[in-house]
Amino acid sequence: MVTLSDIPGRVLLVGAGKMGGAMLEGWIGLGLEPARIAVIDPGPPSEVAALLEARGVALNPLNGGPPAVMLLAVKPQVAPEVLAKVAPLAGPQTLIVSVMAGRTLGFLEAAFAPGTAVVRSIPNTPAAIGRGVTVAVPNAAVTPTQMSIADALLRASGGVEWVEEEALIDVATAVSGSGPAYVFLLAEALAAAGAQAGLPADMADRLARATVAGAGELMIRSGIEPAQLRKNVTSPNGTTAAALAVLMDEERGFVPLLTEAVLAAARRSRELAG
Ligand SMILES: NC(=O)C1=CN([C@@H]2O[C@H](COP(=O)(O)OP(=O)(O)OC[C@H]3O[C@@H](n4cnc5c(N)ncnc54)[C@H](O)[C@@H]3O)[C@@H](O)[C@H]2O)C=CC1
Ligand SMILES: O=C(O)[C@@H]1CCC=N1
């Protein structure tokens, strides 16, 4: 098994915003030596800049030779101009790992020298607390060792699932990549509904947060299927059944709505391919 300290060279992070910064924190937390990391970012968020300064991670270094890994975490929309600038920093042995939504293996391969090893992946923001999940696909040039290196870097943020079919990344983006936003919206909507139904707003907010967090933790720790956990809350002819009759309506309920949302996100991921 490859660990972060086995990576044969530097890790160059291009774009240290919300996602890149979260991954960086994970690597440092798991013992990747700060001297083995460098960051390229013209304007990292202040908390990331403070972390770089505190740990002595090089920001925008002028040289250093080709890195072992270049991890791309800029917005997909600026990828063409950013890649044109950073591609010359990669050597023949450099492994490219992208977390950019939509940007395909084909797009990434075209930006680097022929034969460059590229992994396209999609993480999510619970990466910031090591509870993310990432789905990744390698191109044909990725060696087993490089795949283990990519796995170690991505696993610092949580679980990793490898797929062989690249099209699945667009769907994973719509489910797990964007998914935390759906859950946060659920917390927002539950709080708003509670306030509208008469709870003090701050209390509705606390109850909604605790409910979403507690339900998520129960699902993980118990290992019980979500459908069974739902049934465990639902007494026959009780309050939950009354709510679920609305939420599980086959036409207007949560399932058709979420299906439409996931399909919209997957479609957008395919559009971002450019
Ligand atoms: N935020 C999320 O939930 C997820 C984001 N992603 C992907 O991660 C990537 C980054 O997203 P966020 O971190 O949310 O965005 P962000 O805006 O927080 O971070 C982007 C960073 O790129 C930097 N940047 C801009 N121009 C640059 C350049 N020329 N060279 C180097 N760095 C440059 C910015 O200063 C910023 O710090 C995107 O491609 C997105 O699709 C993937 C999965 C989840
Ligand atoms: O909204 C986006 O495009 C990115 C990718 C997945 C989550 N955030």
Image: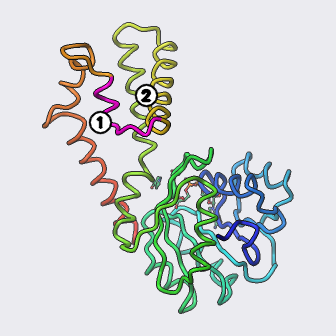
Which residue is at 50% across, 83% downward? 109
Q: Could you tell which of marks 2 and 1 lies nearer the N-terminus?
A: 2
Judging depth in this view, the residue of 32 and 193 nearest the camera is 32
Give the dominant element type of the magenta stretch: helix, strand or loop.
Answer: helix
Which residue is at 50% across, 53% downward? 133
Relative placement, left or right, of 167 versus 119 is left
Give the extent of the magenta segment: 222-232
Q: Check whether the beta carbons of the residues at disc 2 and disc 1 lie within 8 A of each other.
A: no
Q: Is residue 201 above or below residue 211?
A: above
User: Based on the displayed image, in which of its 4 quarters is residue 247 positioned?
Assistant: top left
| Residue that carries the numbered disc 1 in the rendered image | 227
All told, the count of numbered labels is: 2
What amino acid does circle 1 point to?
Ala
Judging depth in this view, the residue of 159 and 59 nearest the camera is 159
Tell which quarter ligand 1 is in.
bottom right
Q: Residue furthest bottom?
A: 114
Q: Position of residue 198 (x, y in %)?
A: 37, 7
Judging depth in this view, the residue of 51 and 69 nearest the camera is 69
User: Based on the displayed image, in which of its 4 quarters is residue 190 positioned?
Assistant: top left
Q: Position of residue 158 (x, y in %)?
A: 57, 53
| Residue that carries the numbered disc 2 in the rendered image | 188
Judging depth in this view, the residue of 123 and 1 nearest the camera is 1
Disc 2 on helix, strand or loop?
A: helix
